[in-house]
Image (tube, rainbow, N blue to C red):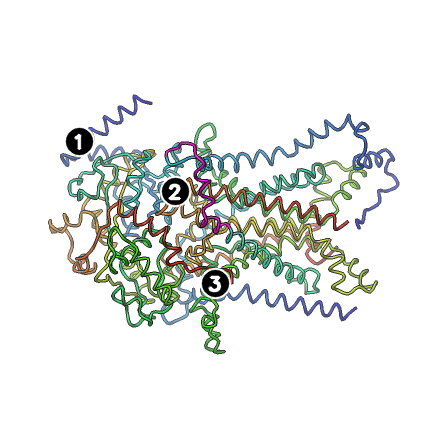
Amino acid sequence: MTAQPEASGSAAPERLRAVQARNAPGPRDAIAKRAPRKWSLAWLGLVPFFLFAFAFMLLPTVSIVTGSFQDGQGAFTLVNFAHLFRADILGSYLITIKVSATTALLGGLLGFLIAYAITLGGLPKPFRSFMSTFSGVASNFAGVPLAFAFISTLGRVGFVTVLLRTLFGIDLYGAGFNLYSFWGLSLTYTYFQIPLMVLIITPAIDGMKKEWREAAENLGASALQYWLRVGVPVLLPALLAAFILLFGNAFGAYATAYALTGGLINLVPILIGAQIRGNVLHDSQLGYALAFGMVIVMTLSILAYSWFQKLSSRWVK
Amino acid sequence: MSSRRGSRLVFSWIWIALGLVYFFLPLLATFLFSLRAKKGVLSFLAYQHVFADPKFLQTFGFSFEMAILTVIIGLALIVPTAIWIYLKLPRVKPVIEFFTLLPFVIPPIILAFGLIRTYSRPPFAFVSSPLLLVAGYVIISFPYIYKSVDAGLRAMDLRGLTEAAQSLGAGWPTLLFMVIIPNLKTALLSALFLTFAIVIGELTLAVLLAWPAFGPYMALMGRNLAYEPAALAILSFGLTWGAIGLIQAITRGRPGGGSNLGGTH
Amino acid sequence: MKKFAVLAAIVLLAGVGVFAQSTSTTDMNALIAAAKAEGQLTVIALPHDWVNYGEMIQKFSAKYGITINELNPDGSSAEEIEAIKANENNKGPQAPDVIDVGLKFGPEAVAAGLLSPYKVQTWDSIPKDVKDKDGYWYGDYYGALAFEVNSDIVKNVPRTWSDLLKPEYKGKFALSGDPRISAQAYMTVIAASLANGGSLDNVQPGLQYFAKMNKIGNLVPLIAVTGTLASGETPITIEWDYNALANKDKLNGNPNIQVIVPPTGVVAGIYIQGISAYAPHPNAARLWEEYLYSDEGQLIWLKGYGHPIRFNDLANRGVVPADLAAKLPPSSAYANVVFPTLDQQTVLAQAIANGWDKIVGANIQAK
């Protein structure tokens, strides 16, 4: 599968052997002398990243989140975490996960189809750069402006609602549609999920060589067979990676939800906002505990995702 | 064969058309609403109000600068790290992924207050430096930059290329700049676009760290005004798109840039 | 550190003592000089159109030549408190000097040691029950909740709480915030409660009222903002009268807005001022407070349709200009106004937060 450019004949044999030795699992003794040095050098390469993450993400967060272990007077307590298991808060985590997973799937699928259309779909070239730049902007069009845009489009007196009523006699809201609901919110979230998917998966689709498709067709495979046997397996790691990104993207979002549903859908980020910036409850310690809970959910999701990645790489082979 | 290609084309056109309808209707609705500033007449009054305010372009310019800095630092930090992980320490990948996905679950308000608290005491009193804002932005962009680069690395045969280049005697800088990066062009552009859009619209960090950025300006205008926020939303969409398009046009001129945009290689 | 604290306490007490007694101008001059030396004041969460803070800021800045650094205009009271806490060690422009928060937050801020006491020259004319006796916080203005109606879309304007339940207003009303988060919103529930048989100890009738409104379809589960008010998505909402009137002015007929104070269930909310204990510019902060509580400052708030806390004092001395007084809703509308106290607010707000989902809850299930 890998089109490995052959090392030119002038490559010294020792070099090739060294390359092979590095990659082949084998007795450590042969490279034992190099291993310790290589290991420590390798870890050194991660220092800038970890230093930055520590200085500007972990340290500041921890300094605030230690509040989740404290009560109002500063004494150590785990009561905030106990609160996390209240029925309404668990329900809140559940619905947040539902919204995130739904929009990740929806955005993932639709985004993939659009990405496919602009890369392998045979459309004229300008479409691709257009969609790429548009996706860049749209991926961050969220919060109040997005909510308002959807309200102006599909709200009770929204542009499309009114149009449908006057031109076609279709009464959206009479038929049960409601923008201010789980599905309305999901529809709105998809607006920034699809572009994100397009941007992330396009390089991966690019990596699928035309030759494979042609070879498959020459061998008589139908489009479906091609996708099932070649396309999806190749893309699966990238698809999973994109999914977890879209999931995380929706998981932490709240401004759109708040502006669209007035807080009636109890997403965890809205609860956190209620505790930290709200004028009623203002139990910031509980807010920090809720944030900590989100970290845990995210960690579990990433573990699940890594596990799926391992499974899928086995399938590819 | 041609019918297959033909049906694929139809399929593509359908999805693009649907996508475009979905994306443009809300923008159209916002735009139509923004034209209603003068009663009973469609006019650009709301836009005039927005442009009459010098702060509009000032804040956009500030955020633009911050965005450029964020992209540079973010890419400089993450691209080598991602490559390093791929080549040397693949087992650490989940850990790095975890750290790059963490920013999703740290509410921006907590990050902002955390940064203030941590960096307001000597000897680390940089709370008033714009670089602290940039650092915060880089953190927020972690997931997007990393995933873009990761997707790009996945799609190219990194190991093979590296070995080939090294066996030909290339050192690390040559490898990085002449082999890997040109092949990562699409992914890097994705990362750039995403980061750019995020920084331009970012609100919480800029507000709490007290910087005259575009996000807070938009939020301020949006307070208790009806038509101007809609005008602003359209304008910011357009401006960001223009800026991103400009960047793409510039990078397309460079070697290896344009070829990737047309199709597979 | 301790010696300094003692010294500061002595100075403060002396200062307070002096100001409480007289209006000697020498002290004011010293304060003005000290404030000017500091040169800057950092305020937080003061939108320009909220009781005319825009003019207040501009006039203060022009009068004393002190630049005002405005933080987070959209911020909530809770965010102001959090900002003081986070900036404890920071003397930079991110740290607020003064705050303007809901009544509820006063004692909380004092308990957390976030405020430094100060009594303005006009201290005595501030009513006793809206200020902290040691001068840590003091009421600044209040307003009553009023209906805000887009009268271009809603031709027959509702005038009472029971009007809002009429079928002709189906899909037309929305709250101006989430009652579990926003003070304006939970006060609305309290007001509804008072109009429907509740009291300042029992807010269940208010929750029932909104449950009913939700059931008959009059309540739109959206947060009403000026945009949705103007577009007709939420043509009826309830806000503080000063906000509603300011919106009316700003929209300037496009669309037409009517502001109605209902005859029953009239609730007023008081906001309070405080100086941060960690203020980077304490003298500028004090001067700002002096300005706010001077006749000039109080009248600026009045111009923004807010009732300044010293309103009665001003009226008694005949200082209120007639045209300004005419712009406010007639005083008869405020005859039945009720001021929930701190403790009542805390209890009621908690009851609303607990009960909102269960009783009113548009149960958002995945369909």
Chain where mark 3 sits: A
What residue sits right under mark 1 in the picture? C17
- C236 in the magenta segment: no
Q: CA distance from mark 3 to mark 1?
A: 58 Å
Q: What subunit carries mark 1? A: C
Give a yes or no on whether discs 3 and 1 share a subunit.
Answer: no
Q: Residue at x 80, y 50 (%)?
A: A1
Residue A150: give its label. 3
Work out how far the residue at label 1 is from the one at label 2, CA to CA, in angstroms.
36 Å
Hey, which residue is sitting farthest top in the picture? C3
Q: Nearer the viewer, residue B149 or A171?
A: A171
Left or right relative to B147: residue B128: left
Element under disc 3: helix
* Residue C332 makes an appearance in the image: yes
Please report contact status of discs 3 and 2: CB closer than 8 Å, yes or no.
no
* Marks 3 and 2, the one that precedes in the sequence: 3
* Mark whose residue sits in front, 3 or 1: 3
* Chain label for disc 2: A
Nearer the camera: disc 3 or disc 2: 2
- Badge 3 amino acid: Phe
Looking at the image, residue A187 sits to the left or right of residue B226; the answer is right
Give the image location of residue C230, x and y in percent: 36, 65
| Classed neighbour count for the residue bearing mark 3: other residues with Cα under 10 Å, few (<14), some (14–19), many (≥20) | many
In the image, is residue A75 part of the stretch drawn in magenta? yes
Please state which of residues C87 and C205 is positioned toward the viewer in this rendering. C205
Q: Which three-letter amino acid code belongs to the residue tagged 1? A: Gly
Give the amino acid type for the residue marked by disc 2 in the picture: Asp
- Judged left or right of residue B217, residue A127 is right
Q: Position of residue C122 (x, y in %)?
A: 17, 41
